[in-house]
Amino acid sequence: DGGITQSPKYLFRKEGQNVTLSCEQNLNHDAMYWYRQDPGQGLRLIYYSQIVNDFQKGDIAEGYSVSREKKESFPLTVTSAQKNPTAFYLCASSDPWGAINGYTFGSGTRLTVV
Amino acid sequence: DQQVKQNSPSLSVQEGRISILNCDYTNSMFDYFLWYKKYPAEGPTFLISISSIKDKNEDGRFTVFLNKSAKHLSLHIVPSQPGDSAVYFCAASNNDMRFGAGTRLTVKP
């Protein structure tokens, strides 16, 4: 079955640590996205990539970094510069008609700073 | 800057009745509007969309209405079923996709 896999499901980070969230898709989609969800707020775009080896900042990119070395993979690193990293992180992918047919989302990673 | 707003955090309806979820937007440049459904511990799944040049799109029990002059769209679910209980996100797209905060729908048997 095609889909998006995010791992881990739950992640705990100590203050000052960098952590990397994994996102893998086997849908052959060119575009991939990272969103952050906080209580009472909509999904906010962190980074997106329309093609391999290229990515752009979204609305809240500060304190995050990404790479897109393979079509299937779009890992997100939450750096120590991110002041409030505790949130639910969602990865998504889409074909060229994603704006019409919607994005495909993973099940998310809940990151907690301890 | 919330360009897509869902002002009702929750909605409760009786099974068999109509559920109406509302969404407002501020950017008149959006091309498409979408609704997603999200169950706990899962990612959102696409439900239905509508082009900005249309005012209605129907898919089974789900109908989306778009009022461009009011910058308002709504999702109607008729009849509502207990399995429809979930969080519904409104989204709008142009070059990227903007999401509302979601409305939690509870359908009571």
Image: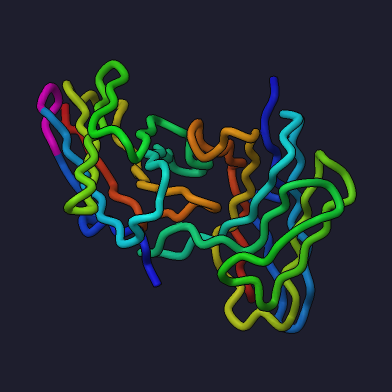
Residue for point 29% across, 35% down:
B85
Which quadrant does the N terminus of chain A fall into? top right
Residue B33 found in image quarter:
top left
Q: Position of residue A96 (x, y in %)?
A: 63, 35
User: Which corner quadrant holds the C terminus of chain A?
Assistant: bottom right
Please report the residue visible at 39 percent of the width from the left and 39 percent of the height from the top: B34
Q: Main secondary structure of the magenta part?
A: loop
Q: Is residue A56 left or right of residue B100?
A: right
> In the image, is residue A61 above or below residue A83?
above
Is residue A86 shown above or below A30? below
* Any part of residue B56 in sight: yes
Is residue B68 a member of the stretch shown in magenta?
A: no
Q: Position of residue B109 (x, y in %)?
A: 16, 26
Viewer-closest of A48 and A87: A48
> Compared to B73, does B27 lie above or below?
below
- Residue B42 can be seen in this image: no
Q: Residue at x 75, y 83 (%)?
A: A16
Please tell me which residue lies in front, B55 or A21: B55
Image coordinates of residue B107 in percent, x first then y, are 20, 33
Residue span colored magenta: B13-17
What's the coloring here?
A: rainbow
Which x, y percent locates residue A12?
A: 68, 66
Foreground: A5 or A102? A102
Residue lying furthest right? A69
